[in-house]
Amino acid sequence: MGDEVTGSALKHWDHPAYSARLQAGRAALAQLLSEERLDRGRPMTGLELELDLLEPDGSPAFANDAVLEHLHTSGEEDALYGAQHELGAFNIELNLPPRLLDGAGLSWYESDLAAVLAEVREAAGKAEVLICPIGTMPTLFTDHMGVDALSRARRYRILNDEIMSQRGEDLRIDIRGAESVDFTSSTIAPESANTSVQFHLQVAPEDFARYWNAAQAFAGVQVATAANSPYLFGRQLWAETRVILFEQGTDTRRANQRAAGAKPRAWFGERWIGGVLDLFDENYRHFAPLLPLCDEEDPEAVMAGGGVPHLQELRYHNGTVYRWNRPVYDVHRGRPHVRVENRVVAAGPTAVDICANMALFYGLVAHFADAEVPLSERFSFADAAANFRAAARHGINADQVWPGLGLVPVRRLVLEELLPKAAEGLASLGVGGRDVDRYLGVVEARCRRGVNGATWQVARVQVAEHRQRLERRDALRAMVLDYAARAADGRPVHEWDV
């Protein structure tokens, strides 16, 4: 979805041709797999981060064009760390270069993140706005929800039109949590409230299913420990409201399709898989194209000539199916590969928090993917899905079902069971002991103190409302400005006072 939709591509807008190309892409990927032509090198990692922009008064700043102009020296999208538009006019996205984790890889990620955030913060200052890495924008209200809230990048306007056309009626955002929201929108602008961080892990194709299944199995733990999205439209909802908002804000199903049990595009899944093709086949079976753009490439001809196809149609379609753990096919320096894109965790609060979340993911997935008895054989997919939902609702105070333990508080599960396994997994990836201790120590401290981004936001708003006697909107503005300042300071969120 990071690729821009160009004018020349729009001339090739052809739904029947697109469907045929999807099938050709699937056949080419199957052939690449059967001929063992996909890369089996060392496990490269990558990171994408989405950010929000704030006005000096704490309101959302619809200023991504201006900030990107200050960042880009030539107007190209390959400027500073791939800085580019995201869905909302108050969002931007950053992409860090792929790397190995061995040695001090996690520390390098933290230093790179801190440096790039400082540069983006400087560019934002030139546009007279602030940056805020946070899960849902606390000061985005329903009166912001016009089409102007959407980025002016063409692909997002087209995406909006296609989602609303397929749906055939306004979106309904209906969320019941600590408080409730019930709002209808004629655009997909509510989805722009969400920002996240994505962790990528390249894997050997024969190992993909084990890694994906493992990532699904502990996704609830990730959500619980890193929750950072308690507010939407002025209301306190779920600890990780992103999850339910993503599901509702990208829902292309018509009413009769929802009633019949059709799958939402933001989808946890329904079963453990046996291989990467299972997921691409589900994409074709359950989801209509949203960006039916055809490339000039003929995958069959490329394969016949011994070349490597880019499979642009397959990638466009996959980019509009919002799995929490997404399969990715890509070509890097002429070598095709597959990777797991972990989309579970909210953005922020700080570079060290992001790297702690990264350490937990990579450590657990490495450990459980190599386990003698995989998690997918030890408990049901339905339990994994229920864990994910419970974690989104209750965050760090959630309970999780876990093999051999039954229903257990997530803080106890992490402290007593999972942190040692994550440390083993990181060690198997060659991560140095200092990095293991530093970043898993952040997760440990969150669990011991019961503090993450979501709990801090709620506590800070309560202080503003009850001690400072502020109305909710003003309390949210005060909180998000305090949050942005502390995020810039760089100390992990469990050390923030209220």
Image (spheres, grey):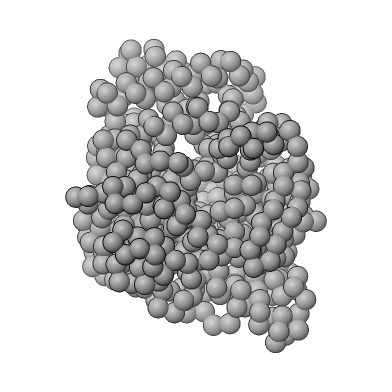
- Describe residue 163's horizontal placement relative to residue 201 as left or right: right
As displayed, is residue 11 above or below residue 419? above
Residue at image x 62%, y 78%?
460
Specify whether residue 377 is in view: yes
**Which is more toward the observer, 125 or 297?**
297
In the displayed orientation, state which residue is furthest to the left: 372
Specify whether residue 337 is in view: no
**Which is more toward the observer, 127 or 437?**
437
Can you give x and y, in whole percent of width and height, for residue 336 in the image? 34, 31
Quadrant in which residue 497 is drawn: bottom right
As displayed, is residue 462 above or below residue 215? below
Residue at image x 75%, y 53%?
183
Q: Quadrant of the C terminus?
A: bottom right
- Describe residue 475's horizontal placement relative to residue 270 as left or right: right
Residue at image x 69%, y 36%?
255
Can you give x and y, in whole percent of width and height, for residue 54 in the image? 68, 63
Quadrant in which residue 102 is drawn: bottom left
As displayed, is residue 57 above or below residue 256? below
Q: Quadrant of the N terminus?
A: top right
